């Protein structure tokens, strides 16, 4: 099976969970990991580098994001949503410029708990969820058309394996340009701006990089895609505090034996508790079988 990269965008507030996110990515992949890259605002790079040490390469957002894309974000995205949108653009932009066969993209607050084969023999796992957010589907419809948007599942799962060739093909289709190559930075920028420009930012959550990629891959490569359950759990807010720097993957696996990932949202940190019978599994996708490999749907 081919080696893959790991890409994790983050900001300083993500430091409590970043170590676990990196560890979970390494332990959660049967594919060899060729490189782990953490991407952060330039002002945060030194602090994050000191935290992760040799576990990851830390690069500045400015190495991935072009001034043209940044200017468009500043012009059309409401200030309170800009950081969220920038992180999505970083994921797509980094993957589009990668020469790897696959990049496992993970949110910095999400810890993978189970091993999976992400890419093998030209087929990739695609994580799905039942929590459909209609504006994400509408954005794909505006950008890529009805056929691509026609999906009854969501792909917003806090992580996805993304194939650089598929991301470049998606951006090419969305911008009407010729098929992109990794070195076509100007054309990739055009594709990213078209993706961004198709969103309705009068809505609080107008677009999703994960849903866009999943919808495109389902449309363009259905026979090379194997769906797998999200299987994510988010502990609900409790009075007790968990010490993130003392948490271990083994502990999380023991506490959540049926989950494949755990997400610690930043606005709830300091209020999580493990080892309680009063944990909420409201975000665990109970509609789907938690499995390492699920055959693609016809």
Image: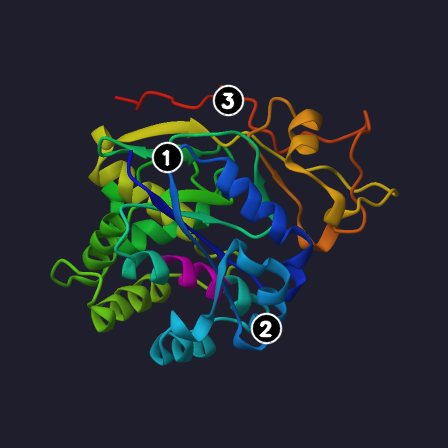
Residues drawn in magenta: 85-92
Q: Is residue 193 above or below residue 38?
A: below
Q: What is the basis of the colouring in this image?
A: rainbow
Which residue lies under the disc numbered 2?
46
Residue, x 57% and y 33% (percent of image)?
A: 113
Task: Tell me, yes or no, whether the highlighted magenta stretch contains residue 91.
Answer: yes
Which of the marked residues, 1 or 3, is nearer the chain's N terminus? 1
Which residue lies under the disc numbered 1?
118
Instruction: Name the foreground residue: 175 vs 87.
Output: 87
Q: Is residue 230 above or below residue 20?
A: above
Element marked by disc 2: helix
The answer to whether 144 appears left or right of 269 in the picture is: left
Q: Is residue 138 above or below residue 121?
A: below
Cα–Cα gap, marks 2 and 3: 38 Å
Element marked by disc 1: loop
Which of the marked residues, 2 or 3, is nearer the chain's N terminus? 2
């Amino acid at each position: 099976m081919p080696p893959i990269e790991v890409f994790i965008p983050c900001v300083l507030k993500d430091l409590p969970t970043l170590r676990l996110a990196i560890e979970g990515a390494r332990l959660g992949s049967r594919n060899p990991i060729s490189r782990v890259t953490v991407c952060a605002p330039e002002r945060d790079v030194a602090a994050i580098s000191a935290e992760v040490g040799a576990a990851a390469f830390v690069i500045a957002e400015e190495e991935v994001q072009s001034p043209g894309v940044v200017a468009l974000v500043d012009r059309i995205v409401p200030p309170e949503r800009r950081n969220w949108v920038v992180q999505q653009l970083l994921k797509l932009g980094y993957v589009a410029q990668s020469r790897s066969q696959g990049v496992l993209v993970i949110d910095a607050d999400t810890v993978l708990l189970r091993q999976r084969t992400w890419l093998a023999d030209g087929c990739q796992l695609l994580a799905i969820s039942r929590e459909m957010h209609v504006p994400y589907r509408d954005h794909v419809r505006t950008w890529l058309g009805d056929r691509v948007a026609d999906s009854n599942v969501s792909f917003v799962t806090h992580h996805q394996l993304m194939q650089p060739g598929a991301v470049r093909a998606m951006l090419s289709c969305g911008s009407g340009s010729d098929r992109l190559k990794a070195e076509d930075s100007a054309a990739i920028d055009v594709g990213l701006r078209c993706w961004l420009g198709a969103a309705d930012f009068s809505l609080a959550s107008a677009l999703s990089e994960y849903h866009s990629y999943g919808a495109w891959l389902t449309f363009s490569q259905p026979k090379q895609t194997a769906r797998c359950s999200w299987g994510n759990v988010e502990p609900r807010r409790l009075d007790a505090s968990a010490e993130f720097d003392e948490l271990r993957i083994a502990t999380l696996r023991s506490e959540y034996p049926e989950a494949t990932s755990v997400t610690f949202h930043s606005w709830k940190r300091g209020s999580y508790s493990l080892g309680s019978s009063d944990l909420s599994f409201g975000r665990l996708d109970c509609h789907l079988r938690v499995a390492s490999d699920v055959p693609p749907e016809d």
